[in-house]
Image: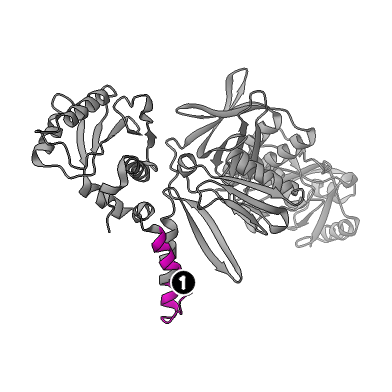
Amino acid sequence: MALEWERVGQPGFDRIVDALVHRMYDASASVEVVNGRGGDAGIDIKVTSGSRVRIFQLKYYLDGFPTASFKGRRKSIEKSFARAMKHSPWEWVLVLPCNLTPSEREFVDSLAVGHTVRVQVWGRARLDGLMATHADLEASFKRDQLFEAARVYQQERALLMGGVRDVSARVAALGQQVDGLDDHWTMDFARQGETVVQMLRGKHPRAHEVSPVEIKLTGKARLAPELAAAVRRSLGFGLPEEVVLPRGAVESLTVSGPEWLSGEHRDVEVRWRPMAAAPLKETRADLVFLNGGQVTASYPSTLDHLGHGSIGRSVNVDLVGGNLQLMIPRTTGESASMRFTFSLEGLEPIAALRLLRIRQRLVTGGDFEVRTNEGTIGGGDLPPQSEEAHQEVAELCSYLEDLEVVQRHCEQYFPVPAEVTPSDRIALRMARLLVQGHCVISPFMPQARFTLNGEDSPVLRALLSGEPHALRGGSDEFAITLAGRRLDLGPVFFFHPRTAADAEDSQPALSALEAGCGDGQKVTVRPADGERFRLILQSSPADAEQVPVPLRLSGFPEPR
């Protein structure tokens, strides 16, 4: 049954059209209802979508505006149209509770002559169709709403002769009645054992602005620090987080708002979660670091959320693998706060390095801003953190840099390993230095073992004599294993200026050489004084420095 427009009156007609326009345009545009007590300037409702402006003019003319006896109404429409044109609208909409006659339609169309504006009419048929589309709005304005609700409640108490189908049908019917209680809010509900769960939900993104609901919580005890911080972020700054207050933490819940919703409740668990926000006009952002007003670093990001709460506003920015939250108080002089969280899981070293370098700059402190094409939307001046924090980030960055260099050299790309043993860490640093053309001392190479080919020489006899002697050898391949992968760096040279053969090998080898049967004899040689062999890639430049460079790994002694 359609609304009886003849009975709603002028104020009721205006309320219905206001609610209908909000429902149709709130998600994609800005809707402003003008209070006409000081003169409406030709605007009853203004809808702004980007550069396009729609102006709605409401006239409660039940019997239209025939030419013969209602010239005053036509004059009023003309004046409203003329005032609206001063705002250069893209579209002008006349809303009435009646259908127009041909002559009335011709009169309205003639208003657009000489203007670029589109002229539309929402008459009774159009209003009936729109209200049918938004059935909950229609239900909320029907006179017999209370009767319908009572009738459905009696159905709930009836025997469910149809089984599960009746349950579904009657829950759906009750839901429709709840939807009809209010233009802007509804209540989702569920039964869990003896508990009825009620979930307040806005019907459109601006429900909290058009019809504010105030919730007052009285706590039984002091909240745990983590829960208190979550409440502050969510309610104080509008960050999109779900917060759960258990029964033990809530003494009472008082709701102030629409009459059907208001009241005090006890023995409740309270949950609130963010409503799906309207799409942001701008989502691309840059996280910018400054020094003396000059940009020192800039990282691309995605603007995920802009929120408002009782304390201030919030900015939520997503980066690959990380998230930055800004909480900016509205009170002048109070400091903004920031949370930066990240995870390296599943990221390749180059992406992980970006996150760590952002973390380094945040630890160092100084000015930063979040910018979009429309300008700066947040920022702050961070104090420097402790030396321990600096050291922790620097060591992790160093590890990722080592891994990125080695992966690129070997052309094997994989995510950052979740765990690395101390031996793996040392091997990775050695590998990076080798790839970059340096000479390194390998703590994993205390000795080398040779098999003689039978050829004799003074150099070989000197080595077997027990006196320290320079030695240089080569290997066709050198590889490290990391995260179950074999990373081959290529052929290497190994050498040491003072090596000697093990005594248990040298005498048998000398005897075999004397007898002319040294072929196949095995000899172990070791650097003097417990030192280790030096390594350098055979692909290094011929003039590469062959003096070992230190590994410089915190917590590990330098090999010698």
Q: Quadrant of residue 335?
A: top right
Front residue of 481 and 3: 3
Callout 1 crowding tier (Cα within 10 Å): few <14, some 14–19, many ≥20: some
Q: Residue at x 15, y 36 (%)?
A: 65
Front residue of 522 and 357: 357
Q: Position of residue 29 (x, y in %)?
A: 37, 38
Query: Which region of the structure is painted magenta?
Result: 146-168
In the image, taking residue 53 as reference, residue 286 lies left or right, namely: right
Q: Residue at x 18, y 27 (%)?
A: 75
Q: Is residue 66 above or below residue 332?
A: below
Q: Position of residue 524 (x, y in %)?
A: 82, 56
Q: Position of residue 403 (x, y in %)?
A: 64, 45
Q: Which SS class for mark 1?
A: helix
- Please, what is the three-letter code of the amino acid marked with disc 1? Glu
Q: Is residue 163 magenta?
A: yes
For label 1, the residue is 156
Report if residue 548 is visible in the image: no
Q: Position of residue 197 (x, y in %)?
A: 57, 62
Q: Residue at x 90, y 59 (%)?
A: 504
Q: Is residue 181 magenta?
A: no
Which quadrant is the N terminus positioned in? bottom left
Q: Number of numbered discs present?
A: 1
In the image, taking residue 176 as reference, residue 269 lies left or right, namely: right
In the image, taking residue 149 as reference, residue 78 lies left or right, namely: left
